[in-house]
């Protein structure tokens, strides 16, 4: 599955590393993941989500607030994948959705990729049913056509790269915020609220097959959970400490609103 990020030759497993025919070698970390992000491809020293964001997301997801989303994702994937297929989760974060997909989809090999080394370390350490690597969505360290499915939950991607690693007729399932996602939250934070767009994003080389809107009302969130939610979203960068305190105490309910979009490679 893996290919060398330096020369594109296939990588073969050694005792504790992956190695290509040209002698490029990538060690398998103690937690079981492989770092396939060459230093020269990095734009910063420690790209991707940082440890605080990842810890906040893990605590939040562990509490089950988004389990309904994970279940809906798995239901859609079960409809299009066979037990011999491989699935790649792009920007898998700390691995919650990928690991639940691996458990739900009997036999499907699930790969998780994220540019954040901390995120991948978290994922590989806890979830032994995953194949995890550090890499960028813009330069996927996989051979052509090896995946039957791709999952992209709130993560960046490149349409050409996605099409390249998918086999003909393969599927891409994306999750994005629908218009009213975290509406009450935003009403508190901003003078004017901009709703998320409801347009369907074009993915070059793919046809859009169907859209599912998934909504839930999250009743009486506690202050600490609200803080985790803030810390795992881009809102974290826009709010000062005093504002966080206000938000945490005042909201009786928050709207959750997602789009699941299924595409097929042309
Ligand atoms: C909002 S998080 C979503 C994580 C996970 N899918 C979830 O919903 O819990 C976006 C993730 O994309 C990762 N990311 C950002 N830029 C990336 C890139 N160029 N390639 C791969 N992952 C990237 C971040 O490190 C982060 O884990
Ligand atoms: Zn190589």
Image: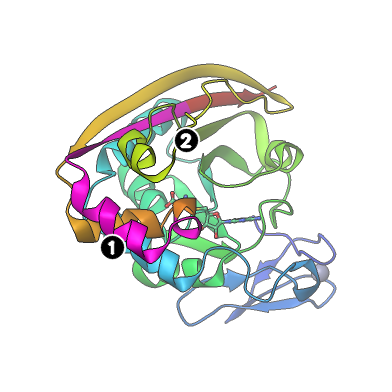
Q: Residue at x 31, y 49 (%)?
A: 103
Does the Cβ of the disc 1 residue fall within 8 Å of ligand 1?
A: no
Horizontal relation, residue 172 to residue 79: left or right: right
**Region in magenta:** 236-260
- Provide the residue designation for mark 1: 59
- Provide the residue designation for mark 2: 175
Specify few, some or many for label 1: CA neighbours under 10 Å numbering under 14, 14-19, or 20 or more. few
Q: Position of residue 186 (x, y in %)?
A: 39, 40
Q: Residue at x 56, y 59 (%)?
A: 114
Q: Residue at x 71, y 42 (%)?
A: 158
Within the image, what quadrant is residue 52 found in? bottom left
Is label 1 in a helix, a strand or a loop? helix
Q: Position of residue 88 (x, y in %)?
A: 54, 47
Horizontal relation, residue 20 to residue 196: left or right: right
Q: Quadrant for ligand 2?
A: bottom right
Q: Position of residue 142 (x, y in %)?
A: 69, 53
Horizontal relation, residue 157 to residue 235: left or right: right
Asked whether residue 137 appears in the rendered view, the answer is: yes
Does the Cβ of the disc 2 residue fall within 8 Å of ligand 1?
A: yes
Q: Is residue 45 above or below residue 229?
A: below
């Amino acid at each position: 599955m893996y290919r060398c990020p330096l020369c594109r030759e296939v990588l073969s497993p050694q005792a504790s590393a992956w190695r290509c025919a040209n002698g490029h070698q990538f060690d398998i970390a103690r937690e079981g993941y492989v770092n396939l992000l060459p230093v020269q491809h990095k734009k910063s020293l420690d790209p991707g989500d940082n440890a605080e964001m990842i810890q906040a997301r893990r605590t939040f997801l562990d509490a089950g607030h988004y389990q309904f989303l994970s279940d809906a994702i798995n239901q859609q994937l079960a409809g299009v994948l066979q037990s011999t297929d491989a699935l790649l989760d792009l920007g898998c974060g700390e691995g919650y959705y990928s690991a639940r997909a691996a458990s739900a989809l009997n036999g499907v090999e699930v790969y998780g990729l994220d540019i954040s080394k901390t995120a991948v370390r978290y994922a590989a350490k806890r979830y032994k049913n995953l194949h995890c690597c550090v890499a960028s969505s813009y330069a996927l360290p996989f051979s052509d056509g090896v995946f039957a499915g791709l999952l992209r939950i709130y993560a960046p991607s490149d349409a050409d790269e996605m099409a390249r690693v998918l086999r003909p007729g393969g599927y891409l399932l994306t999750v994005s915020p629908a218009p009213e996602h975290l509406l009450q939250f935003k009403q508190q934070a901003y003078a004017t609220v901009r709703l998320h767009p409801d347009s369907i994003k074009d993915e070059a080389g793919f046809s859009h097959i169907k859209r599912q809107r998934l909504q839930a009302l999250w009743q009486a969130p506690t202050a600490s959970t609200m803080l985790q939610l803030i810390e795992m979203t881009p809102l974290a960068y826009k709010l000062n400490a005093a504002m966080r305190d206000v938000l945490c105490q005042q909201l009786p309910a928050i709207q959750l609103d997602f789009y699941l979009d299924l595409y097929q490679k042309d």
